[in-house]
Amino acid sequence: MSGTTSTGTSTGSIATETGERDPFSPRPRDLRPVRTEPNGRRIRVLFNGQVIADSTRTLYVFETGHLPVYYFPRADVRFDLLTPTDHHTRCPRKGDASYFTITVGDRSAENAVWAYPDPIPDVAELADHVAFYWDRADAWYEEDEEVFVHPRDPYKRVDALPSSRHIEVRVGGELLADTHHPTLLFETGLPIRYYLPKLDVRWDRLTPAPTRTRCPYKGEARYWSYEGPDGTRIDDIAWSYAESIPEIPKIAALVAFLNERVDLTVDGVRQPRPSTPWS
């Protein structure tokens, strides 16, 4: 899946049941609920035409149950465009947070920036850093490439592999797609997605949907809904990336169906519908 409907949360193995690090896991052995790592990529945040943060010294912050977050050194942030507010929150894992409003020209984003000026000892490195709510900025860049939705997790893998498996997609017994030339997408923590050539899809049963989502690992997707002969309708049942990001070019212009809502057959074997947030 993609974009705002796909959190991209990694489920990579961190440790075995005995607490020892899995030797095949790329993640460092660190079982703290909040873990930080230095990030050498240049990260920029734009708001109303202005670069409000620009740093090659951000921290990745990984927190159990949350997406990764970039924390910027205060020296790399345009504090002349930030105004402290009276808003405060308490996090048991990090400490007391204070907030700032961004103002550039005639636009503002209230409480869009937060900081832990006196974090708890376990995350003392967060002192003198600030973080931004992703969707309250206009654009984010890693080096010179725009990134969407949230930071890319360096420990998450997305692999697209061409295959000769026989893939059939059905809804209520009606065949929607049939191909021997799929591309299989393997993404950490998600079901296998089968991307199919458009020529192998029945477009008379699919209508364009207004939904658009973005994924930091794959790009921007458009969607189609299913309309059956008996009036059955399933919204956003299929999607495609017209132009995927450079790392995953193999799925560009192919079509995938939501495994959770269709009957999928692979090499003659009916696949169980996975249980996910899209079920």
Image (spheres, grey):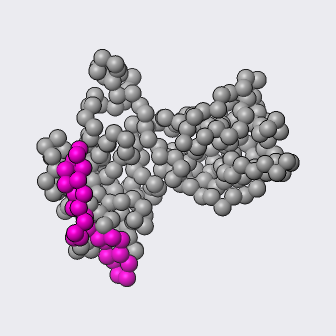
Classify residue 192 as left or right of residue 112: right
246 or 47, which lies in front? 47
Q: Which part of the image, by quadrant, shows the C terminus?
A: top right
Q: Is residue 90 magenta?
A: yes
Q: Which part of the image, by quadrant, shows the N terminus?
A: top right
Q: Residue furthest right?
A: 229
Q: Residue at x 39, y 37 (%)?
A: 155
Q: Residue at x 47, y 46 (%)?
A: 7
Percent from the top left, x then y, of residue 218? 54, 48
Question: Where are the magenta residues, as a range?
Answer: 84-110
Looking at the image, is 88 positioned above or below residue 264? below
Q: Quadrant of residue 111?
A: bottom left
85 or 58, which lies in front? 85
Q: Quadrant of residue 211?
A: bottom right
Classify residue 165 as left or right of residue 144: right
Q: Residue at x 43, y 37 (%)?
A: 10
Residue 250 visible in this rendered orientation of the protein: no
| Number of residue marks | 0
Q: Residue at x 22, y 46 (%)?
A: 92
Looking at the image, is 216 positioned above or below residue 250? below
Residue 3 visible in this rendered orientation of the protein: yes
Q: Quadrant of residue 178?
A: top right
Percent from the top left, x then y, of residue 142? 39, 54
Q: Residue furthest top?
A: 18
Percent from the top left, x then y, of residue 239? 66, 49
Classify residue 92 as left or right of residue 254: left
Q: Is residue 260 magenta?
A: no
Q: Residue furthest bottom?
A: 106
Classify residue 99 as left or right of residue 172: left
Please tell me whether the stretch drawn in magenta is mainly helix, strand or loop: strand
Percent from the top left, x then y, of residue 136? 40, 65
Looking at the image, is 106 positioned above or below residue 131? below
